[in-house]
Image (spheres, rainbow, N blue to C red):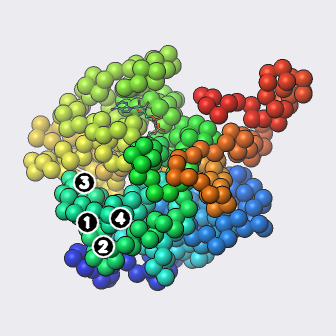
Amino acid sequence: MSVLKAMKDTKGVLEIDPSLPYKVADISLADFGFKEMKLAENEMPGLMAVRKKYGSDKPLKGMKIMGSLHMTIQTAMLIETLKELGADIRWATCNIFSTQDHAAAAVAKAGSAAVYAWKGETLEDFWWCTEQALTWPDNSGPDLIVDDGGDATLYVHEGVRIENAPTLLDKVYDSRDMQCLIARLKVSYERDPKRWTKIASKIRGVSEETTTGVHRLYHLARSGELLFPAFNVNDSVTKSKFDNLYGCQESLADGIKRATDIMLAGKIVAICGYGDVGKGCAKSMRGYGARVLISEVDPICALQASMEGYEVVTMEDAAPVGDIFVTATGCYHVITGEHMEQMKDEAIICNIGHFDNEIQMSYLDNNPDFIKENIKPQVDKWTLKSGRSIIVLAEGRLVNLGCATGHPSFVMSSSFTNQCLAQIELASKQYEKKVYTLPKQLDEEVARLHIDKLGVKLTRLTQYQADYIGVPVDGPYKADNYRY
Ligand code: NAD
Ligand code: 3DD
């Protein structure tokens, strides 16, 4: 049930109220949020350095920034940093289960951003929050977007598509997300058939946090539909080879254990996908003493997994023997109903990919013969017709943020330092409507900001050595396309 019941609605669509300063679960949680944010300072040296280096110059002064990114304590620190750089900020989460309510309350209480986010949003709430964050009190839109998964970018692009071809409003979608979005855009179009075209024309660019969102950006760029410049933050080495890898290495186990208290040692854990996220997940599960199976489509990643000592199998092989299943692919229906029917009684399935379609949840949701028993928030036991049950975590949404608190602050500091650098780039320079990545020099700078905290003693090249290996003595030490 939506907490927005008080809002006026038109044709079942909750009206936005841009003058609403915030909408969070419980503003009284703010002090708890402030305490955890204070603790995060010591673990986020990159963000602290950004505040110190750019705080006085205010490079984001006058910039209206909309964020669609998991509303966690770490994100609250990113928001505070963007605020210190001069930005005027509005924020929504990018997943209905990922908000930490005390973080949202702290941001709202401090007035660092107009924040619309709470843990356990309905899909209608989610798209209301996204439009609420995209709309300033004067009904204008943002200059810049911080996106994670591309839903804010999608909102603007779908709005412009519809304004250019209103018959798209009659298109029928299977996805409940798209049904919610199109219903909102229908009301918006009737009010102002040029609203999103005007908003899009003012957007200087978007910086995209995650792999799946980046895939969407390149798709828009290839089709010539990209409406504004974009920075691919995910492919900064100090993001994807850290957040995706080491972040998931720690937060996957956190999610599974908080949800189920299951013993991992000795169990068979099947990880679908051996990319940056899958690598971290596999290493974590092996570290707990689980026997890890990997499924992969990419022969290079499959070869890597095999040479790391993992057994590489198909999901059809894994389904009848696995105890715990984790999807980490960014793909669609990787675990199907057919696989579920093969699974052991009370097998656990979860997803750590960005969206909720890696597990075929529709197989469960649409079958009246199956019995769903809610064990606790984000933990459901589904009993199939066979009488065997499966435990589904976070309704197939990312388990580390749905059942736990996501990655720790230190690794998010690295990701979010890249976000700040990308936002400063977009605010200070004119870019074409293409997808860019940050230069290696900045990537190495982000790494430099984090190594002192870990007591790293960096070796320094002599000029002769630098000349000998053909690199500048102060870097960058690798070519932009170097694969770490
Ligand atoms: P990646 O592209 O590096 O890895 C995905 C891997 O999955 C690839 O190697 C690909 O070959 C493989 N794959 C694709 N379809 C498959 C299928 N049907 N079966 C088996 N393997 C398949 O991407 P990544 O950076 O590892 O990210 C994976 C997902 O996790 C993305 O959706 C990303 O946005 C998300 N992500 C989540 C978090 C989090 O905190 N939950 C953090 C970072 C990224
Ligand atoms: N993500 C994981 N943990 C997070 C946290 N504590 N705060 C904000 C976002 C967090 C998701 C990121 O890894 C995002 O970069 C992604 O999905 O790639």
Residues under labels 4 and 3: Cα distance? 17 Å
Q: Mark 2 points at which residue?
A: 189
Disc 3 residue type (three-letter):
Ser
Is 111 displayed left or right of 447 in the figure? left
In-image side of 417 versus 169 (left or right)? right
Q: Are marks 2 and 4 in contact (CB under 8 Å)?
A: no
Q: Is residue 83 left or right of residue 230?
A: right
Mark 3 close to ligand 1, CB under 8 Å: no
Residue at 32% across, 63% down: 164
Q: Which amino acid does label 2 sit on?
A: Tyr
Quarter of the C terminus within the rendering: top right
- Dividing the picture into quadrants, the one containing residue 441 is top right
Question: How far across and how far down the image is residue 2, in percent?
Answer: 30, 72
Q: Residue at label 1?
A: 166
Residue for point 74% across, 31% down: 477
State which tag comes first along the sequence, 2 or 1.
Answer: 1
Q: In this view, does 429 lie to the left or right of 284?
A: right
Q: State the SS at label 3.
A: loop
Residue 242 rendering spot, x and y as whole percentages: 59, 39
Distance CA(mark 1)–CA(mark 3): 19 Å
